[in-house]
Amino acid sequence: MKMLVRWALVSVAALFSVPAAAQEFPRQMRIIVGSAGGTGPDFIARLIAPKLGEGLRNSVIVESRTSANGLVAAQFTARAAPDASVIMMGNAGTHAINAALYKKLDYDPINDFAAISEIATIPLALVVHPSVPAKSVRELVALAQRSPGKLNVAIAGAAGELMGNALKLQAKVSMTNVHYKGGAQAAIAVMSGESDMTFTSYVVIAPHVESGRLRVLGVSSAKRMPQLPNVPAIAENGLPGYEHEQWYALFAPAKTPPVLVQAMHREAVRIVNTAEINERLISTGHRVIAGTPQQLAEKVRLEIEKTRQIMQASGMPQQ
């Protein structure tokens, strides 16, 4: 009988814990995004915002504060009140690459934020112009070994440059980086034959692969994408251990009360595991993560160190 009473009390407490936490949230929350509409962080933020508002019983809007590498958005979030009125859809760029890329950064990706939850990751595809005589990553490496420096890589942003440099370092080959303003320009450069290859989102360039204007050699994740079972991972094609993905995660300002962080984490996990959101993420090439705050905080630390090592080894300059 005592066990039944105890179980009942615990059940009632659990039943009322979510509404109690929800009442502590501000009436309106903002998810800050540091990149343009249609990009990965913006897409995922807008996908989950309505569901987050439903779960927390408030209004959640997505606010864009675009700038180079998401600097403005990250700075704004880091300095916001720690009351969950402002959170951020961060990513590998804002919370790992920037820490290694900039000599002076106006925010600390580790100490200025409270990790909430990693939402999803997505690999990039390595694509080449059809004239490049390589049908696999292994053949591409062999080609680069025979012709040092002659192949060029269209680069759009630090993430693509890091992936390319990591490949060159591991394969011990020399290829030339050519910088472009954005991913669309880099893809166009490869399709026109101006550049030989690039790392890009497969979802974006899939029609061009299907039409024969581009050839995909591999994906940057450790394993094949379920959506592309016939496309090998770079890691299984001569470069074991190669793994570099874009990732997206929620962060709050540091000193946000743990009860609010945990409540947002629980909601994030619930949302990405609903059939509607889960299927949408998977159909667009993402792998759902829904990790704990502790796992996300540790990932940020590891990713910063990994980025610094690649930059130093490849001679990639700081800004």
Image (cartoon, rainbow, N blue to C red):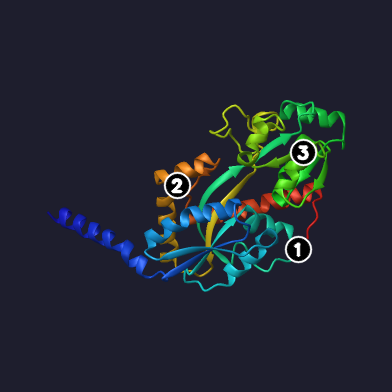
Which mark is in front, 1 or 2? 2
Tell me the element at label 3: helix
Q: Residues within 10 Å of mark 1 (few under 14, many from 20)?
A: few
Q: Which mark identifies residue 277?
A: 2
Residue toward you, 53 or 250: 53
**Position of 124 compared to 146: left or right?**
left
Residue toward you, 202 or 21: 202
Q: Residues within 10 Å of mark 3 (few under 14, many from 20)?
A: many
Vertical position of residue 128 compared to residue 274: above or below: above
The answer to which image quadrant residue 141 occupies is top right
Residue at position x 76%, y 34% in the image: 171
Q: Residue furthest left?
A: 1
Query: Three-letter amino acid code at disc 3?
Result: Val
Q: Which mark identifies residue 147?
A: none
Residue at position x 60%, y 26% in the image: 230
Q: Residues within 10 Å of mark 2 (few under 14, many from 20)?
A: some
First-in-chain label (2 vs 3): 3
Query: Three-letter amino acid code at disc 1?
Result: Lys
Vertical position of residue 216 compared to residue 35: above or below: above
Query: Three-letter amino acid code at disc 2?
Result: Ile
What is the CA distance from the residue labelled 1 to the residue labelled 2? 38 Å
First-in-chain label (3 vs 1): 1
First-in-chain label (1 vs 2): 1
**Position of 256 compared to 270: left or right?**
right
Q: Are marks 3 and 1 in contact (CB under 8 Å)?
A: no
Q: Position of residue 167 (x, y in %)?
A: 74, 39
Q: Position of residue 150 (x, y in %)?
A: 87, 36
Mark count: 3
Tell me the element at label 1: loop
Residue assigned mark 3? 190
Q: Position of residue 183 (x, y in %)?
A: 70, 47
